[in-house]
Amino acid sequence: MASAGKDPHSNISAKGLSGEGYEGHYFWDTEIYMLPLFTLSSPAIAKNLLRFRYEILGASRDRAREMGHKIGAKIPWRTISGRECSGFFPAGSAQYHINADVAYAYIQYFLFTADIDMMLEFGYEVIYETARLWIDMGHFNEDDAFMINAVTGPDEYTAIVNNNYYTNVLAAYHLKWAYDLAEKLATAYPDKWERIKEKIHIMADELAIMKKASEQMYLPFDKALGINLQDDGFKNKAEWDFAGTPKNHHPLLLHYHPLTIYRYKVLKQADTVLAYLLLDNESDEVIETSYTYYERLTTHDSSLSPCVYGMMASRINQTEKAYNYFMQTIRLDLDNLHDNTKDGLHIANAGGAYMSIIYGFGGLRIKSDGLHLKPTKPAEWETIRFRLKYKDSLVTVTIGEQLTIETEKPINFIIDGSPIQVDGTIHMVYHGKH
């Protein structure tokens, strides 16, 4: 709360106000790890943080042209003023997924608050301009599948790959919403829509391509393993010698050349598993099989990783593992687990601790049909209680021997996959393991 910018011209630096690490720059950490706290509890702050990306949209358009794109905007990987400040492009500019991360945060905020005025004023412009980049950089192959090549996903130990699953699936979500929102705004607010169309030169054929690309996005999958592959070439890499790597050689990037790391199946942080957390888009079987596969390959050298694996452990009902990851998350700076707290607190990890309770143990997912809950409770705790401000209604969720939900007006929930409308207070048995 102290570190969040309170006006549209500032954001949240990776170390907040607690240290000089990362020189005060802003990353995707804000949208994916920090914004949920504000979206769910302080929407006015969340809106200002989102508006920051609009304030730098001109610089993002300039960055896209610098990188050879004819249209669209490229959100800088590392910035304060809007200019790209990353000097290492394989783990900086190549992380195109930040465009989809920003769009995802806008969409989550909109679904949670129903703030259509934000979309009309500046939100849709950001979503559309950043979506244009996928069309400019991607292509349909001979089978008419949409491919996105030469990118780096969230895992910075795997760089410049083709069809990173996280990037592609988030891009598909991004493109779908760019199209769907255009239809919604054009129908419900025709006059304002015309002004938006004229301002950023929206074309019907471009929207049609966005729709097609979202529906025909290529998502790498290995039938033999039953998992989504992190990218086209990931399976063919050599195994990293985890057992033979000394503990004092972590994080790997401080002890091995990047090209050495890139040649192996080793992850710095959650990648495909993070996509599952954000979109909840695959079957339970695929999610659990993929989780098991990638967990053994992940070093968690990034502070952004343990919280994600913990939340997804809750998702697959491995509550003991989820609690262990949660303890790693909340102790990271208290116990200086990465030996770098002197450079500042890991603010995204702090956001991950908040998310671990609500998105992890609470099983919250924000979707267009309502609030999804799939509660689990660690054996160490008797009760979990959290509050949200959903569409101007205070919502209180209590997970104990039973699940209790309190609302101030009728709200649609999907509990363990079953829809229910709550108006007032309900008590129900839930099936989460504890």
Image (cartoon, helix red, strand yellow):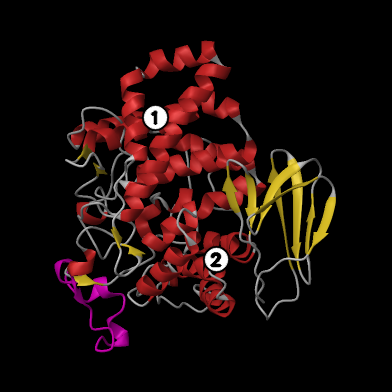
Q: Identity of the amino acid at label 2? A: Arg
User: Residue 125's x, y, as percent?
Assistant: 43, 27
Q: Can residue 304 be seen from the camera position used here?
A: no
- The residue where tag 2 is placed is 315
* Disc 2 residue crowd, few under 14, some 14–19, many 20+, Cα 10 Å: many
Q: Identity of the amino acid at label 1? A: Tyr
Nearest the camera: 154 or 180? 180
Distance between the alpha carbons at the discs numbered 2 and 1 = 32 Å
* Disc 1 residue crowd, few under 14, some 14–19, many 20+, Cα 10 Å: many
Q: Quadrant of residue 342?
A: bottom left
User: Residue 21's x, y, as percent?
Assistant: 38, 61
Q: Is 143 left, or right, of 366 in this rendering? A: left
Q: Quadrant of the C terminus?
A: bottom right
- Of label 2 and label 1, which has the lower sequence position? 1
Nearest-to-viewer mark from 2 and 1: 2
Which numbered circle lies on residue 128? 1
